[in-house]
Amino acid sequence: MSNQLNGIAASNGVAIAKAYMLVDPDLSFDKKVIENEDHEVQRLHDSFATSKDELEVIKQHAVKSLGEEEAAVFEAHITILADPELISGIEKKINEEHVNAESALKEVTDSYIAMFEAMTDNTYMQERAGDVRDVTKRVLSHLLGVKLPSPALINTQSIVVAHDLTPSDTAQLDRQFVQGFITDIGGRTSHSAIMSRTLEIPAVVGTENATTTINDGDTVIVDGIHGKAIVNPSDEEIDQYQQMAAQFEREQAEWGELKDSSTKSADGKHFDIAANIGTPDDLAAVLDNGGEAVGLFRSEFLYMNSAELPTEDEQFEAYKKVIAGMGDKQVVIRTMDIGGDKHLPYLPLPEEMNPFLGYRAIRISLDRQEIFRTQLRALLRASNYGKLAIMFPMIATVNEFKQARAIYDEEKQKMVNAGQRVADNIQVGMMMEIPAAVMIADKLAKYADFFSIGTNDLIQYTFAADRGNEHVSYLYQPYNPSLLRLIKRVIDTAHQEGKWAGMCGEMAGDQVAVPLLMGMGLDEFSMSATSMLQTRSLMKKLDTTRLQKLVDQALDAESNEEVIELVKQLDIK
Ligand code: PEP
Ligand code: MG
């Protein structure tokens, strides 16, 4: 009998394959007195050797998908495995205390970890504690004969099932083998979901119990269109979903024909369709899908994919690649948005009760100005290679924007004074993602060159519902008049002040929201590259003069559902 799991549709498409459980196994064991020491020592050596082989594979993979620097951590793990002092310490324990290899290993590595952690004046050595912990886990898994899964070890067609996926897990997934993924937690705008859309992997998130319901090797269907997963499907179900996958492919081919056309409504009004990207590698998909701009480059991924703060030169190269790659099309780069659910191992943040309401984004940049100024200088240097716009995340007050802009102006002036070239057409704008900022959009528009509405956060802050918490995902209500009124306010205010308004939250590529946003006169729609052509196709079919009435009715509705019904009644050919 098949079993159906309901979750949140995170990335379009249908996939059918065997489940690969990316779940930490149970590594508990009993301490035992043994009689055959040689046998235990041999088991230890075998486990070290297998661990080393495995780490070589993971390292090679990480070099390819994440780069040399990020892969260095696996090299460090291999070095630990080769440490003669560590091995002889464990052997000694086995021989002298007659204990099993598992407990000898754990006791010796625990003492290493305690020693490293005590070196409070040496952060480098302190961080080695984590490496020893990871290596111990791997060797232990081989001693116990249980699988320690790693995204890099997947080499057959699979559906990855995990509690959650970190950005580095996602980066290591090989698109050739990973057909889809299912997670227990997360919402449509959690970062694992956003990454799945960038990678074009069908995904269902927030199922709550995928990891406890699905077993390794089960056949699974991921229905990323409706947010469902079918475990051990019947032949009829497989048949039905294969047809759905084929239909989806046909639609994609139809959208593909619009790649080189500009985005126009049925009555000839132009809109910009832009892409959201996380790294320069995403640029190919933007161009392949006919992007007219980059509306959001989440620069924090550059920081997250690095072992330490990226230098000005490293950042400059990355920004230049994107800006030059887009030619005369605009690239909006957002300054670092760390905090919330995005962390840097090398930049410890304070423990917070509510990280999404805490030390995040521009709040960190204004506090840790040396980091901010380095980023601004890299951006200013890269501005010479195309059409750059810069935006600040999480602006809540006029004062924050003025402070950020003043720092930008100062860095720019310093460079000009030093004879460095800087483009003279850089726009400086802000994300609109905090209700307080929306309410004073008229004041902010005096200082900002543009607004980009970040609905992922604007929705969570408006409804007071954590964007990554599946228990409150019913409050992700993009069409609720409360939110639509905020959006309308931002667009109208920007236009009154002669500024443009875009949207880079996931709502911009949402097919139900698009008619509403067109009717409100949103100028730029920035979304996952994979949603761009579908949206262009929809826009072509809509007449904006007729959407005015829809907007009026929607703003006057009572609920999210009522607005969905209104949009459904549109006659879209
Ligand atoms: C948003 O909040 O809508 C947004 C685009 O930014 P992020 O998802 O990176 O927080
Ligand atoms: Mg945001």
Image: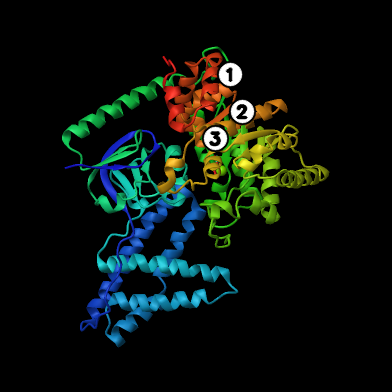
Mark 3 or mark 1, which is nearer the start of the sequence? 1
Q: As drawn, which residue projects farthest toward the top?
A: 267
Q: Position of residue 571 (x, y in %)?
A: 43, 15
**Pointer 1 local density, CA inside 10 Å: few below 14, some 14–19, many at least 20:** some
**Pointer 2 local density, CA inside 10 Å: few below 14, some 14–19, many at least 20:** some
Disc 1 residue: CB within 8 Å of ligand 1 = no
Mark 2 or mark 1, which is nearer the start of the sequence? 1
Q: Nearer the viewer, mark 1 or mark 3?
A: 3
Q: Is residue 188 visible?
A: no
Q: In which quadrant of the rendered view does residue 57 lie?
A: bottom left
Q: As drawn, which residue projects farthest toward the right?
A: 417
Residue 329 badge: 2
* Residue placed most toward the observer, 7 or 422: 7
In the image, 213: left or right of 87?
left
Quarter of the image with the N terminus is top left
Describe the colour scheme in one phrase: rainbow
Secondary structure at numbered mark 2: loop
Instruction: Say which residue label 1 marks.
Output: 270
Q: Nearer the viewer, mark 2 or mark 3?
A: 3
Residues at badges 2 and 3 in contact (C-beta under 8 Å)? no
Which residue is rendered at x = 26% and y = 31% of the image? 241
